[in-house]
């Protein structure tokens, strides 16, 4: 109902359909085969070359996403079901973009400094971000609840606040992988890093071994939120 409602109310329903297909990591051809239509039909809807889809089309589209995900083990649906209430004292705060955003664009927005895996950043598309209080998440959030960090999809940016050297957040993500089998598209460490005070080498090694691009920024967190909110419009 949430997905169907978003598509129906969107000013760009085709773009919204594309976003959800990509969140479920389903190729146009696979979706077309499941729906018994041509790939060009899917492409035309997503590109706005067909008139806005009706309720019946949207219903079939959403059901197809669910059915294909179920055949794969239901990983995406399980993540979406992890809806939870957040308050101002929460250890993390998730936000979703209206469409996929190139990771390189996010790095530019926050004046980020790439610590490792710059080539992988060029390959990544993200659908949201989560701002995390490093201290709170390590002290208060049980490992089995780390799935909540990923909002609607793990294809997102995790931004850690109150970071000293970066080791603890990366260790938390590595440990969390044992219970969630998920990892973010990119990690941003918010702190005062300099050549004299670089990111902890262990944190860098973990990021490299997990193949997660690591970025640092000292832009004020309020400015980061304001800059990234432009992608949510």
Image: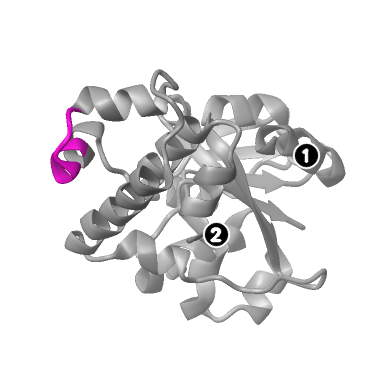
Above or below, 117 relative to 72: above
In the rendered image, residue 23, in percent from the top left (x then y), is placed at 40, 46
Above or below, 182 relative to 212: below
Callout 2: 10 Å neighbours few (<14), some, many (20+)?
A: many
Of residues 60 and 150, the one nearer the viewer is 60
In the rendered image, residue 27, in percent from the top left (x then y), is placed at 25, 36
Of residues 54 and 129, the one nearer the viewer is 54
Residue 113, quarter of the rendered image: top right
Q: Residue furthest top?
A: 49
Disc 2/disc 1 C-alpha distance (Å): 18 Å
Residue under label 2, please give it: 151
Of mark 2 and mark 1, the one earlier in the sequence is 2
Tags 2 and 1 in contact by the CB under 8 Å rule?
no
In the rendered image, residue 219, in percent from the top left (x then y), is placed at 81, 36
Residue under label 1, please give it: 224
Give the numbered dot on residue 12.
none
In the rendered image, residue 131, in percent from the top left (x then y), is placed at 69, 54
Of residues 108 and 153, the one nearer the viewer is 153
Callout 1: 10 Å neighbours few (<14), some, many (20+)?
A: some
Q: Give the residue at x 39% y 59%.
A: 182
Secondary element under disc 1, as helix, strand or loop, is helix
Q: Give the residue at x 53% y 66%.
A: 172
Task: Give the magenta part as a residue range.
Answer: 32-38
Please say whether residue 165 is one of the residues in the magenta stretch: no
């Amino acid at each position: 109902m949430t997905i169907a409602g978003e598509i129906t109310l969107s000013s760009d329903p085709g773009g919204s359909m594309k976003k959800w297909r990509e969140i479920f990591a389903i190729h146009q051809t696979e979706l077309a085969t499941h729906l018994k239509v041509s790939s060009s039909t899917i492409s035309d809807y997503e590109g706005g070359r067909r008139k806005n889809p009706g309720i019946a089309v949207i219903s079939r589209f959403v059901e197809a996403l669910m059915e294909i995900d179920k055949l794969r083990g239901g990983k995406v649906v399980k993540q979406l079901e992890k809806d939870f209430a957040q308050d101002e004292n929460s250890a993390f705060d998730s936000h979703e973009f209206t469409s996929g955003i190139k990771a390189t664009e996010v790095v530019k927005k926050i004046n980020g400094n790439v610590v490792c895996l710059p080539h992988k950043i060029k390959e990544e598309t993200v659908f949201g971000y989560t701002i995390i209080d490093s201290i709170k998440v390590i002290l208060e959030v049980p490992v089995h609840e780390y799935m909540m960090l990923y909002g609607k999809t793990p294809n997102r940016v995790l931004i850690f606040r109150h970071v000293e050297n970066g080791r603890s957040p990366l260790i938390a993500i590595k440990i969390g992988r044992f219970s969630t089998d998920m990892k973010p598209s990119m990690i941003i460490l918010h702190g005062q890093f300099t050549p004299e005070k670089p990111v902890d080498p262990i944190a860098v090694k973990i990021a490299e071994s997990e193949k997660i691009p690591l970025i640092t920024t000292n832009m004020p967190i309020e400015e980061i939120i304001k800059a990234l909110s432009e992608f949510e419009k």
